[in-house]
């Protein structure tokens, strides 16, 4: 497939608003693609480049792209940024710049979809001192051969944000339709493989190929997530339930085959290098080939440490040995997804638990199963008394559902007034904080869109501001006066005194006394609070205020 044909398809999708129409457009393209093209097309159309399980990163920031686009169009990077500010979109800006350029040059090497993909792999693999320069040249080469329309989508793919409104759900339906397979089968295969590209390839082979999928060690699967709920409701619905402590640390997935082991974070990044102590402990705990799910906590003098110290260890690239001595990291394993070649996610939790206890000799998180509310409530009290966050209640008959925030895992913890929000902008600080960002604009999500909710300027130590600055500086999209806008990448946990209805912000709410609590760089932008859940909180707040007045 020519990259031009792919771009035309993107253009058509961008001009289509109905979900069913979009599914039809995608489904019509899929059967004609070769086995090599199919996975690339499927990932690209969702604005992704590599398989979701892959830790591979392109390693280019927006600035490098602007510089490359400037070089191709014969203008400065600053002029490119001006253009982006005036069009409001990187893709459109690059398209316009290339259309001016292409009136001057006559020669284009035609871009091919798979060839673009292999170039991106090469870019991702460039490492070391000179790599930024090499990456810049490679991006220039690609853009230099692109027609204006191709430039529009290439630029957006390079930033992994295609903005044509195609989500995983639509692609799942399109794959099912194109190859005449059940969409539940497609979804199930995606849960095990964590790569829609590969799933599409198997769908082309047939339903049996989808049915036979197994989890592959060292291809991390998405983590199963939890909802809020109550002990009473869970017992009423399920009778006997399983309760575990809710550890306030960082999620991990441990993969081991023979002597080879890797550790992945909640965002499926490979964090093996930062946590050799955890790897060692888990290797000592089992002789089997396994994929384990759990939470690492930091312990000092027998007590769990604040979660921030765990996250810092997850990010650590230097002085790992020194960091190991200061605080003990302890894994708590609560699930097993794969054992000696067998995929276990479809088995009930009770059976997975039996296997877990049979093959892992240490660090298995204790579990209490009971249908008696008093016993579960006691476990909750014990968890809080031991310094943990609360408990997790799980349905013993439930499968492991990767990536899903369903009703089979319920978290019970004291109600606290904090929200996880995306950082979308900032203002430079003043005085001694003039070299870092001082106040931040944070947003919640509304059907995939980010909606500003508040500014947060208090609660930061100087050290935290410096840390946040380091994490955000590469993501600046535009600057105007003291204001900067970010490519959203970072999540803050923000505390507040009260939710207020407000017309100052688009979402209709504002936070009273917002303050920074902690960085949640274990969370993705897709994990932040939704406007729906904020509305719910607002209602609950109003109800409890009323109860108080009467
Ligand atoms: P939350 O981040 O508040 O949505 O809570 C869900 C998170 O709690 C999971 O992603 C895990 O990181 C963490 N967690 C701690 N203990 C457990 C446990 N026993 N079972 C499952 N998740 C746990």
Image: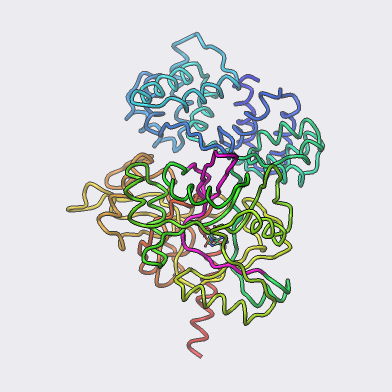
Query: Residue 364's quadrant in the figure?
Result: bottom right
| Quadrant of the rendered image holding ligand 1 | bottom right
Residue that sits furthest to the left in the current view: 431
Relative to 280, 379 lies left or right: right
Residue depicted at 32% across the width and 24% down the height: 76
Query: Residue 350's quadrant in the figure?
Result: bottom right
Estimate the x, y position of residue 523 in percent, counting from the top left.
Answer: 48, 52
> Tag count in the figure?
0
Quadrant (top left/top right/bottom left/bottom right) for the N terminus: top right
Closer to the camera in the image, 83 or 547: 547
Estimate the x, y position of residue 67 in percent, counting from the top left.
Answer: 36, 26
Residue depicted at 58% across the width and 79% down the height: 377
Identify whether 426 is placed above or below 317: below
Relative to 300, 122 lies left or right: right
Q: Is residue 383 magenta?
A: no
Estimate the x, y position of residue 461 in percent, counting from the top left.
Answer: 27, 59
Estimate the x, y position of residue 241 in percent, counting from the top left.
Answer: 68, 70
Q: Give the residues in magenta.
A: 242-270
Residue depicted at 48% across the width and 29% down the height: 155
Closer to the camera in the image, 469 or 100: 469
Residue that sits furthest to the top in the current view: 106
């Amino acid at each position: 497939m020519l990259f031009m044909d792919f771009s035309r398809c993107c253009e058509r999708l961008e001009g289509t608003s109905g979900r069913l129409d979009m599914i039809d457009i995608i489904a019509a393209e899929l059967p004609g693609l070769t086995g090599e093209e199919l996975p690339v097309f499927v990932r690209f159309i969702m604005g992704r480049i590599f398989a979701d399980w892959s830790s591979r990163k392109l390693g280019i920031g927006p600035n490098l792209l602007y510089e490359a686009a400037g070089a191709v169009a014969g203008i400065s990077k600053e002029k490119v940024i001006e253009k982006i500010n005036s069009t409001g979109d990187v893709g459109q800006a690059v398209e316009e710049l290339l259309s001016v350029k292409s009136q001057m040059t006559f020669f284009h090497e035609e871009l091919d979809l798979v060839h673009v993909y292999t170039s991106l792999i090469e870019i991702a693999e460039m490492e070391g001192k000179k790599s930024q320069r090499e990456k810049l040249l490679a991006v220039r080469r690609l853009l230099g051969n692109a027609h204006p329309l191709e430039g529009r989508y290439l630029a957006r793919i390079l930033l992994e944000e295609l903005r044509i409104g195609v989500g995983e759900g639509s692609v799942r339906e399109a794959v099912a339709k194109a190859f005449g397979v059940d969409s539940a089968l497609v979804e199930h295969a995606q849960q095990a493989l964590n790569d829609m590209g590969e799933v599409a390839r198997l769908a082309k082979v047939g339903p049996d190929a989808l049915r036979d999928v197994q989890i592959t060690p060292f291809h991390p699967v998405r983590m199963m997530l939890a909802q809020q709920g109550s002990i009473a409701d869970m017992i009423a619905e399920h009778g006997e339930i399983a309760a575990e402590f809710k550890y306030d640390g960082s999620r991990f997935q441990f993969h081991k085959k023979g002597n080879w082991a890797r550790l992945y974070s909640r965002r499926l990044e490979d964090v093996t290098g930062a946590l050799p102590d955890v790897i060692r402990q888990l290797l000592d705990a089992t002789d089997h080939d396994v994929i384990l799910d759990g939470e690492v906590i930091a312990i000092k003098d027998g007590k769990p440490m604040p979660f921030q110290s765990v996250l810092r260890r997850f990010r650590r690239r230097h002085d790992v040995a020194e960091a190991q001595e200061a605080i003990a990291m302890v894994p708590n394993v609560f699930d097993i997804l794969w054992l000696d070649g067998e995929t276990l996610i479809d088995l009930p939790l009770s059976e997975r638990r039996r296997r877990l206890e049979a093959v892992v000799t240490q660090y298995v998180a204790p579990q209490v199963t009971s249908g008696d509310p008093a016993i579960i409530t006691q476990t909750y009290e014990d968890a809080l008394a031991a310094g943990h966050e609360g408990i997790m209640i799980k349905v013993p008959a439930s499968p492991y559902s990767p990536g899903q925030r369903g009703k089979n895992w319920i978290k019970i913890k004291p109600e606290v007034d904090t929200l996880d929000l995306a950082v979308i902008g900032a203002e430079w600080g003043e005085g001694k904080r003039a070299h870092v960002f001082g106040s931040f604009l944070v947003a919640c999500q509304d059907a995939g869109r980010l909606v500003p909710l508040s500014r947060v300027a208090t609660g930061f130590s100087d050290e935290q501001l410096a840390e946040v600055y380091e994490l955000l500086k590469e993501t600046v999209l535009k600057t105007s006066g003291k204001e900067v806008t970010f490519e959203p990448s970072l999540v803050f946990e923000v505390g507040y005194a009260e939710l207020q209805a407000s017309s100052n912000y688009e979402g209709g709410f504002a936070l009273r006394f917002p303050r920074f609590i902690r960085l949640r760089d274990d969370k993705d932008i897709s994990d932040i609070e939704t406007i729906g859940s904020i509305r719910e909180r607002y209602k609950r707040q109003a109800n409890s205020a009323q109860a108080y007045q009467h």
